[in-house]
Image: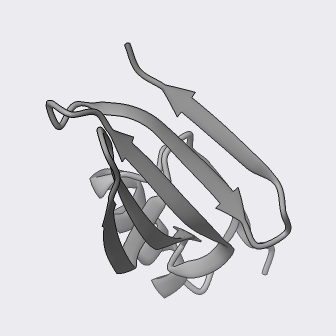
């Protein structure tokens, strides 16, 4: 018997239920899922505060895991440095990955 091939557009509440239902059918095969949003887990740890003359710096480590269909498809780890001014306003945030790539955001 030839299986019906099913592709799902969107993996939200409904898309997840459709994927589960397709897996339960002997005559259906899930061939793909298209979605812009995946499930993410973010873990923040090793937070340390350092104070300077006019600034405070919060150093942390962040691990971000992306999941699709319940499978971990990517994990990124960053060392994060957040700099605050004398009024405790966030002025700068630096993300450095373990592969030495980095990006910075500044706030005014």
Count of picture labels: 0
Q: Quadrant of the C terminus?
A: top left
| In front of the other: 96 or 6 | 96
Q: Which residue reaches farthest left?
A: 87
**Which residue occupies 32% across, 42% down?**
55
Query: Residue visible at 61% across and 66% down?
Result: 78
| Applied colour scheme | one colour
Q: Position of residue 87 (x, y in %)?
A: 14, 30
Residue 107: image quadrant is: top left
Which of 55/60 is in front?
55
Residue at the image point whose x is 41% and y is 54% from the top: 15
Left or right, 15 with reference to 9: left
Quarter-of-image position of residue 16: bottom left
Left/right of residue 54 with respect to residue 88 in the rendered view: right
Tell me if I can see residue 6 in this picture: no
| Image spot of residue 11 (x, y percent) | 45, 53
Q: Position of residue 103 (x, y in %)?
A: 69, 41
Give the answer, above or below, for where 38 lies relative to 85: below
Q: Residue furthest front?
A: 53
Q: Name above or below for residue 3 compared with residue 101.
A: below
Q: Is residue 85 above or below residue 107?
A: below
Task: Answer yes or no: is residue 48 visible.
Answer: yes
**Is 36 displayed left or right of 2 in the figure?**
left
Q: Residue at x 56, y 39 (%)?
A: 36
Tell me residue 50's x, y (percent).
Answer: 34, 65
> Can you say which quadrant of the picture contains the N terminus?
bottom right
Give 60 or 18, whichever is nearer the viewer: 60
């Amino acid at each position: 018997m030839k299986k019906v091939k099913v592709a799902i557009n969107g993996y939200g509440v409904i898309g997840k239920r459709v994927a589960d239902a397709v897996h339960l059918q002997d005559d259906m095969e899930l061939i793909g899922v298209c979605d812009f949003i995946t499930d993410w887990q973010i873990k923040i740890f090793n937070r340390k505060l350092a104070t300077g003359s006019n600034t405070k710096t919060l150093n942390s480590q962040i691990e971000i895991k992306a999941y699709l269909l319940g499978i971990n498809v990517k994990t990124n780890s960053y060392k994060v440095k957040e700099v605050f001014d004398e009024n405790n306003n966030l002025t700068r945030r630096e993300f450095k990955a373990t592969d030495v790539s980095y990006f910075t955001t500044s706030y005014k």
